[in-house]
Image (spheres, helix red, strand yellow):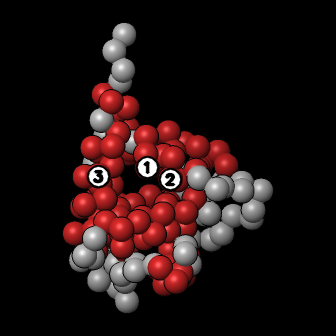
Amino acid sequence: MPIPFEYQNASRQFDQFMIESRDNAGLATTNMTWNMVVGVFHAFRSRLSLEQALIFADALPPVARAIFVENWDPTLPTKEFGTVQSMLADVRSVRSRHNFSTPDAIAAVATALRNNIDMVTFLRALKQLPPAAQDYWLSECNVGQS
């Protein structure tokens, strides 16, 4: 059996996701984009139960999945989804001295992820999560918020 395509092309797929995240946010480099992407994934993860997080992670491409679960302490209390501003504060808290997250960071990363994922699998996973979790990735209401 050959190596599955998603693993053979994991770096290429991740590079495309990072480039789209960078462009969507209007950042100059993918290095500037890195902490934003990590922050968006970790802010979301902190609002899910362990079971919900694993359902979501299973739908992600390999490198995004690794970022989503890195340095995770699943014993921490789950946060509320709350406002876009509170979630953006969590995004910006990742390596805050080197974080260039824009006001539309969540929407920028969400759009790039949707463009670089198997949407059938992704939507199937999201349907198992609370509405606020679905909105985090599917709602465009946070575009342009500051």
Residue displayed at 59% across by 53% down: 70
Q: Categorize mark 2 by other alpha carbons within 10 Å: few (<14), some (14-19), many (20+).
A: some
Three-letter code, disc 3: Asp
> Does the image show residue 55?
yes
Pointer 2 or 3: first along the chain: 3
Residue displayed at 36% across by 10% down: 1
**Residue 35 pos. (x, y %):** 45, 69
Residue displayed at 58% across by 50% down: 69
Residue displayed at 52% across by 53% down: 68
Q: Indicate whether 15 appears above or below 144.
A: above
Label 2 close to label 3 by CB (< 8 Å): no
| Left or right: where 7 falls relative to 115 | right
Q: Indicate whether 93 appears above or below 35.
A: below
Q: Categorize mark 1 by other alpha carbons within 10 Å: few (<14), some (14-19), many (20+).
A: many
Give the residue at mark 1: 64
Dividing the picture into quadrants, the one containing residue 13 is top left
CA–CA distance in space, label 2 to label 3: 14 Å
Give the residue at mark 2: 67
Label 1 close to label 2 by CB (< 8 Å): yes
Q: Indicate whether 138 appears above or below 141.
A: above
Q: Which SS class for mark 2?
A: helix
Q: Categorize mark 3 by other alpha carbons within 10 Å: few (<14), some (14-19), many (20+).
A: few
Q: Indicate whether 59 appears above or below 53.
A: above
Give the residue at mark 3: 15
| Left or right: where 9 falls relative to 44 | left
**Residue 85 pos. (x, y %):** 48, 84
Pointer 1 or 3: first along the chain: 3
Three-letter code, disc 1: Ala
Q: Which SS class for mark 3?
A: helix
CA–CA distance in space, label 1 to label 3: 11 Å
Dividing the picture into quadrants, the one containing residue 62 is top left
